[in-house]
Amino acid sequence: MLKNALAITVLAGFAVSASAQYQAGSFWPDYKGGPLRQASKVVAEAPATELEWEITTDQPAAFGGISVDADGYLYFKSRPGDGSLPKVYKVDPTNGNILATSPGLAGDAGAYAGVSLGTTHVWTAVTSGSGATRVSKIIKLNYADLSVAGEYTNAAFDTAGSSLGLRGAPIIGSVPNQRGNVNLYVHMRGDTAGGSLSPSGLIHCVDSITGQLDWSYDPLMGNTTFFGAFGPGWVSGGKMHLAYFGNQAVASGVCVRDNADGTYTEVWFGGPDNFNWIGSGAMNGTSDTIYVTTFNDGDTPSMWAVNAMTGAQKWSVPGRRGTVHELNFFGRPAAFGNRVYACGGYGVVTCFDDLGTSYNQPWELRPAHVPNPSDPDQFIAPTNTRDAWMTEADFFNSGEITAYTVVENGAGERYIYAMMQQQNQDPNLGTDPLTAQLIVVKDNGTTATEILRTNLNNNMPPTRFGNGSPTVDADGNLYCVGGSPSVTGGNPGKLYKFVVENPCRADTNGDGVLNFFDVQTFLAWFSAHDDRADFVDDNVFNFFDVQTFLAEFSAGCP
């Protein structure tokens, strides 16, 4: 255990207070819905399928995704591709205006982090440099203008060897420590080279007010933890518990308890025996089971249900690698009660009901593909070519879905919002569009229905890992991002807002009155080839869209 090896940088205006809890009323206080990482919410309305606005940002959003504060403002951290420094952005949800940006925050691996929303400040983490010069920081930002309010650094954040410093946004605890403050929990990223077993997946516990490093836990996972992800974090027996699932093939999960007195206890070491990559775990509704999705390298299970307090595997879902039934999940699962949703490779969207020691898979949606006639349970290889798929549409819908969110509206209807990071591509790209897709699916209970699939007329830039989107707010508005330097080669990025469809489409400005201003708005959309002017919904802008709009305008609103 490391203690008191502390170096704190305190900037002007860094105020000390009694605690730094999550901001009350914030809807997505951290990546995928706070410490439990459930990626599911009850919202006022759904589904959000109508594009209300889109903005271009000078840098694309990082993997950490979008957070929404108690007033509805959006926050995300960027991951630039032109050598400039990442920043945190604050965006007005009503119109997409960028209200504030932080100073450039030096960081490379830390650019994967999103932001956590505290009671009085925004938290993030960065790391910069390499080897002996690497410096990692926990950074505290002011809500109003995103200026830097304070920084915590520590030699333990930059352990020599295979470490790449801090990765991911801090988890904010909810149990006071021995000083009466809540703690921040951060983890480190391992390197991909060297093969050293020096500390690379360390979990650190830091006082959110004083910056005191209370403890550091080394799960001894070695350098294979470079794509791991943190969470969930939950309270059991009055103590914070933190789970971490790393990128290695055996015993890739750990759980550690913060004893709130400057010490920790390793609760269990084990979990799924498979590569986790960046999916990590999501807690079920009763906080006794963690669902972990895994990247199916080999014919291994693709999802695990793990006992939260023992690490024991309760059940797992076969991956069926290489077959027409393959399940290969990449992003964090979405848990709603005891139903868990997963999306993944070859465009699959599915869910599982947790029956305790077993599971039921009520439905599965995926593009239709053509099996090998001589072996009906095998794909035709290679599967990323057109001749392996039933139709051209299936080929383009068979990419990898890497981020997804589940919502339930006031009527009890449940929807899955899924982001495909880019459409599957033929090795000979030619003129094929390289775009992301937003997919909306309704869960009917024992069946499912796809109600929207759009790449915004081939204009949605591809992302990497879905960039942690999509995200919803309490009203049910949906936010997702496009753009990634890893895929598009640089900046800029895109941010989109989708809303519940207006029952009166002719009321284009949404003021409840049909008049000249609605016609004016429609014509502006039409001239700009805005997707909202495609009233025929055929991805073509022509006379028939105008004709349909005028007919609905003349008929009036219901």
Image (cartoon, rainbow, N blue to C red):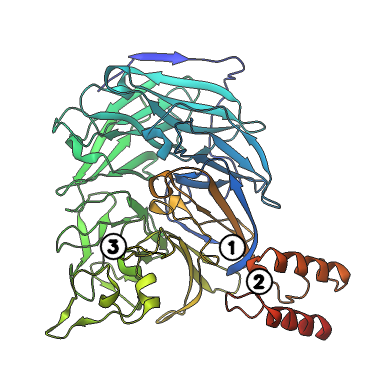
Of mark 3 and mark 1, the one earlier in the sequence is 1
Residue 513, position as x, y percentages in the image: 86, 71
Q: CA distance from mark 1 to mark 2?
A: 15 Å
Above or below: residue 392 compared with residue 271: below
Look at mark 3 in the image and give the residue it sits on: 427
Above or below: residue 444 compared with residue 295: below
Mark 3 residue crowding within 10 angstroms, few (<14) / some (14–19) / many (20+): few
321, 413: nearer the viewer: 321
Quadrant where the N terminus sits is top left
Q: CA distance from mark 3 to mark 2?
A: 38 Å
Assign a secondary structure to mark 2.
loop
Residue 43 marker: 1
Above or below: residue 206 compared with residue 414: above
Is residue 477 among the parts visible in the rendering?
no
Q: As drawn, which residue projects farthest toward the right?
A: 516
284, 330: nearer the viewer: 330
